[in-house]
Amino acid sequence: MASLNDVANDMNTGGVVTGDIVNSSALSDAEHQACLQQVEQAIAIFQDEFHAQGDVFRGDEFQVFLPNPKHALRCAILLRLTLMKCVKGADARVSVGIGSYKQIETELRKTAKGEAFQLSGRALKDMDEERLKLSLPDTVEANPSRDLLIRHLDFIMTGLSEKQAEVLFPRLLYPELTQDALSAKTGIHRRSLASRLQRANASLILDTLDVLETTLIRSMS
């Protein structure tokens, strides 16, 4: 069996996030449009921060490619948060696939091929109640602890309020910032920011994500 290090060290290995808006038909036209704009804005941020490429298509679906697979899970969570902070009750199902890829050009959905895309897309179709899933190649040994952490992270994320998502988004996007710097960046008073982050279990989310990124998924060194 290959290790996750072997997968991450493959120079043609990347991460793909495929998702769709949950119960998009129940949203008003204005809410639906606002959600799509938020996803597009998030993808633009990912392009700057993570050298990502992404598309929104079919009305409520989206896909993001990340050349460094380490960033895929974080971006999947950020995509959920960007919807949660936009419209009350909004959320997404997001499927992360990590594997090889063959071709990446400007129009992602027309040219992208490879294992990472297949894993991500196939898992999204198979998702039921869960809203976060990670799929790895068959050559990577199964890890019940990793799967449990993903379920744990999904459980914590589901049901966050708009205000909690509003502060979690920049907290996860810029984990190196102090609370003072984050307060200045968001315009949210430090005391209010700290209170919302605590109620949202921000430290637990960050710690779980860090374990998955640094210990289990491991980026290229």
Image (cartoon, rainbow, N blue to C red):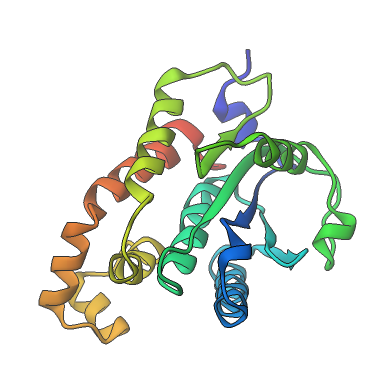
- Residue 133 lies, in percent from the top left, at 54, 38
The residue located at (68%, 60%) in the rendering is 62
Give 36 or 12, whichever is nearer the viewer: 36
The residue located at (35%, 53%) in the rendering is 159
Split into 4 quadrants, where in the image is the N terminus? top right
- Residue 25 lies, in percent from the top left, at 63, 64
Number of numbered tags placed on the structure image: 0
Kindly indicate the quadrant of the structure image that contains residue 27. bottom right
Q: Compared to 138, does 116 lie above or below?
A: below
Kindly indicate the quadrant of the structure image that contains residue 173. bottom left
Is residue 184 toward the left or the right of residue 34 in the image?
left
Is residue 12 toward the left or the right of residue 178 in the image?
right
Is residue 22 toward the left or the right of residue 115 in the image?
left
Q: Compared to 75, does 138 lie above or below?
A: above
Give 203 or 4, whichever is nearer the viewer: 203
Is residue 13 toward the left or the right of residue 212 in the image?
right
Give 31 or 109, whichever is nearer the viewer: 31
Farthest top residue?
1
Farthest right residue?
110
Give 37 or 67, whichever is nearer the viewer: 37
The residue located at (40%, 71%) in the rendering is 85
Kindly indicate the quadrant of the structure image that contains residue 45. bottom right
Q: Compared to 147, does 42 lie above or below?
A: below
- Residue 168 lies, in percent from the top left, at 33, 64
